[in-house]
Image: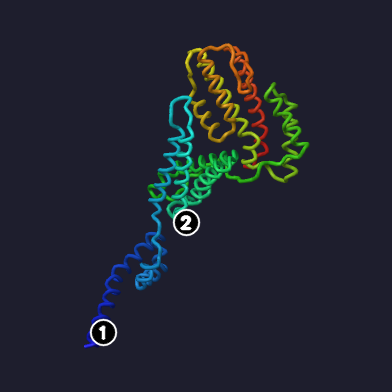
Amino acid sequence: MKQRIFSGILTGVIYTYLLPMIFYVPYYNWTYARDNGFVKWVLLGEVVATGKGFAWPYFVIFEKPKSNIKEHFNKSMEFSNEATKLRNQGQSFSTINDKEMEKFIFLNRKALEEALLIDIEKLNNIHPNFGNHFRDEYIKGLQLLSEGYDKHQNQELIQAQILLNNWGDWYSANLENIKTRNKTEVSVKSLEKSNSEEPKLNASELDRYSKILKKANEEALNQSDIIELRSAISDYTNRTSRKLTKNEYDHFIGTIKLSNDYLYELGTSLLYTWDQKKVTTTTKFDELYKTMKMIKIRKEEKLEEDMNTLAAAAKNQTAIKAQDGQKYEFSREIILEHMKQNELSNSNMDKIQVMMKEFVEQ
């Protein structure tokens, strides 16, 4: 009797093991071929996958389920796109309030959480360098964005913007090939990949560099000015035994050019506003205003002052009160005068950019 009971139990255990094995052997073979490719499966995968099928109880109980790459990727993109829409929303001259900014940061952090669950090598298997760009530009950009807001570090926010733009350029260029599983990678020249530190000019180099930049905001630079500036940058590259990285170039030029572009668009918007007697801003100004606010290149009080100046232009006021409490004359002619000064500064920066590019690594 006992032997019959034991035999029945043993038979049940064997069937409980064998019946699922009939399912798990082909299942593990299929997933191995799907994840690693048919050739790898033929060479070794059949043995590995079949072995997993025989040992199915261990893998069912102890093996953690693999993350769904497509699901996590799509969720991350959805959070990121929603954050971008939030940042770009609104009519002309609108800004992100504190509550919207909190949501913007929250969405980017959710995008990062989903991105970190993705197997980079499996993305590389889908398309050449897909995972590398995703890790080095998209994930790194989101990390810098989060850290930049936490630490109030402007440079991290600028670097994050550059990396995320690089990712967007590469992904857009390769999206069709990714969808069709075409293994050809479309190369996109990176705008910025270097993580080098801010350039450390010595006293002599900084003296010449600072003096020429100051002059560039006041009067037209001549050839001797460009030669003097070139000597400062040349001394720096000779001293460091290398050319400027693109990151260093951005430190020298990027934020200054961005500020100049913003001020020019502010002047254009002020002129339109004065003539039409209502706040009228250019599309470019709207974009730059949000960028200046987000990466904090221009102080908050100065941005508020810009808003007040636009409101004053709409009323054709003859004087405006600045943040320092002082009153200043204001007129259409003064707006034009500032625009001409900004044009001069931009013209000088163009000369400086041409010269600086001689020293940037290709």
Quadrant showing the N terminus: bottom left
**Lower position in the chain sequence, tag 1 or tag 2:** 1
Q: Looking at the rendered structure, which numbered label has been put on residue 6?
A: 1
Q: Position of residue 103 (x, y in %)?
A: 45, 39
Query: Which residue is located at x 48 percent, y 36 percent?
Result: 101
Q: In what element is the residue under mark 1?
A: helix
Point out the residue furthest to the right here.
204
Left or right of 8 on screen, residue 341: right
- Indicate which label's residue lies in the foreground, 1 or 2: 1
Q: How crowded is mark 1: few (under 14 residues within 10 Å), some or many (20 or more)?
A: few
Query: Which residue is located at x 63 percent, y 20 percent?
Result: 325
Query: Which residue is located at x 53 percent, y 28 percent?
Result: 289
Q: In what element is the residue under mark 2?
A: helix
Left or right of 216 on screen, residue 53: left
Total label count?
2
* Rendered image coloring scheme: rainbow
Q: Position of residue 279 (x, y in %)?
A: 48, 18
Mark 1–mark 2 CB contact (< 8 Å): no
The residue that label 2 is drawn on is 121
- Which of 338 and 328 lies nearest the eye of the viewer? 328
Q: Tell me if residue 111 comes above or below residue 348 in the rendering.
A: below
Q: Position of residue 115 (x, y in %)?
A: 46, 50
Q: Position of residue 321 (x, y in %)?
A: 60, 18
Amino acid type of disc 2?
Glu
Amino acid type of disc 1?
Phe
Quadrant showing the C terminus: top right
Q: Residue 32 lies in what quarter of the image? A: bottom left
Q: Looking at the rendered structure, which numbered label has been put on residue 254?
A: none
Q: Distance between the residues labelled 1 and 2?
A: 49 Å
